[in-house]
Image (cartoon, rainbow, N blue to C red):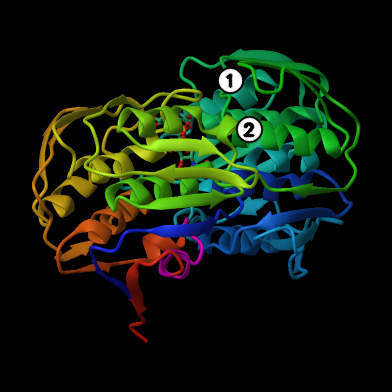
Amino acid sequence: MDQIVIRGGQRLKGRIPISGAKNAALTLLPCALLTDEPLTLRNLPRLADVDGFGHLLNQLGCSTTIEGSRPEDFGRVMTARATTLTSTVAPYDIVRKMRASILVLGPLLARAGEATVSLPGGCAIGNRPIDLHLKALEAFGAEIELASGYVKAVAPGGRLKGGKFTFPVVSVGATENAVMAAVLAKGTCILENAAREPEIVDLCNCLVAMGASIDGIGTETLTIEGVDRLHGATYRVMADRIEAGSYACAAVITEGDVELVGAKANEMEATLSALRQAGATVEATKTGIRVAMSGRAQPVTLSTAPYPGFATDMQAQFMAMATLGSGASLFTETIFENRYMHVPELARMGCDIDVRGRSAVVRGVDHLVGAPVMATDLRASMSLIIAGLAAQGQTEVNRVYHLDRGYERLEEKLQAVGADIERISAG
Ligand code: EPZ
């Protein structure tokens, strides 16, 4: 398994290109199942999860062709076409490796009137049930049975129907599955307390470009008028606001000055506000967002929440940044039940972090010391990179396959702004 080795102490200076958003790409790709015409996605990030999703689409009979990239994009162009579906089954061996595979459930139901998708199981950050996905689909007429670790869903008569569902808990994935199921239903589907993440706005805009009728995009109430069919489209994947926020934390902890090229301030206001709370200079530029810092980060008090609140996907990265802060910072993780896996690893580098249930107090220390550490999940891995960039000496991050799921060309991007970082391939 590859390892990333960092020799800390370099201030990051320069421009970091921000790739297409992983969490947008993973909900845009299944849209190809909703039509027999080609869906072309631009600015698609080069990530393991994107490749994995392409493999799943192929298993279902959807062709995927990579077509290089446009000069104005950092990502690739992929055209996906499901002329006819050859399968409506998402098998366990694929779903267990990539939970986002569950996002084929809604589109398969909408297109084929049936779907058999493995239950994704839990993951490092929590047990992550899919009950809300299933309840929303049932509200639109789906008949669902759980058997032998699989979800078997059927649309009676081959087509879902209008209905209304109010989410008791905001769920990004369940909102995405429900929207993709509703666009071809016979009737009007209403979703209340829907997730409002920018990635869902991207999904809705792509579906509208394909001929869907969706009102309330970006709000917590989505009204979808089902149509008989969707057509192909070309759609550009939004910039990855979590990647951008991650590199912003790296800039702050190294007292650097970077421009996050392609990042959009209006999609990450809570992150930018948290950076300013830490004392960083944050300003929009013509081509992105500039983040600069001198001195130690000020203490922050951050509680994760659904968008537009402070993103749970940013918690580990801000915690790493706070380890060298000038006081005590308080974090509260309200979304997932086990999202502090990075804490024991950060402690190996000399951090002073006290976890009490859903909250964690981080007391700034004078310095961090590089050490061998283990990545456990995607965002935890990034927090170890961020700490290693500021630590004295060498840090080796193991199990970097976690990182490769969500950060494209990480070491190249950091090397280009002065980090002493390299990937050691384990062959
Ligand atoms: C998406 O996961 C993201 N993944 C996650 O990013 C992100 O952390 C999360 O949204 C929250 O923003 C992708 O978009 C591929 P949820 P998702 O459904 O959809 C509970 C990353 O690092 N819940 O919004 O799985 C759930 O347990 C990843 O890029 C139910 O109870 O998250 C959690 O407590 C990690 N029942 C809360 O809702 C359900 O049916 C929010 O989960 C669904 C969710």
Residue at 32% in and 55% down = 381
- Regarding ligand 1, which quadrant of the image does it lie in? top left
> Does the magenta run of residues contain 98?
no
Q: Which residue is mark 2?
A: 200
Q: x, y percentage for residue 334? A: 32, 25
Q: Which residue is mark 1?
A: 194
The verdict on label 2 being within 8 Å of ligand 1 is no
Q: Secondary structure under badge 1?
A: loop
- Which span is picked out in magenta? 406-415
Q: Nearer the viewer, residue 417 or 148?
A: 417
Type of amino acid at the residue the image marks with label 1: Ala
Q: x, y percentage for residue 251? A: 36, 50
Q: Nearer the viewer, residue 250 or 130?
A: 250
User: Taking 414 as reference, is 340 left or right?
Assistant: left
Whether residue 367 can be seen here: yes
**Residue extending furthest toward the front:** 294
Question: Which quadrant, please, contains the N terminus?
Answer: bottom left
Residue at 45% in and 36% down = 282
Q: Secondary structure under badge 2?
A: helix
Type of amino acid at the residue the image marks with label 2: Ile
CA gap between label 2 and label 1 equals 10 Å
Whether residue 150 can be seen here: no
From the image, give the main secondary structure of the stretch colored magenta: helix
User: Taking 60 as reference, is 134 left or right?
Assistant: left
Return the mark for residue 265.
none
Report the number of discs.
Answer: 2
Quadrant assignment, res 384: bottom left
Q: x, y percentage for residue 427? A: 37, 87
Residue at 73% in and 32% down = 204
User: Taking 160 as reference, is 10 left or right?
Assistant: left
Q: Decide: few, some or many residues near mark 1? Use Cα within 10 Å; few <14, some 14-19, many ≥20.
A: many
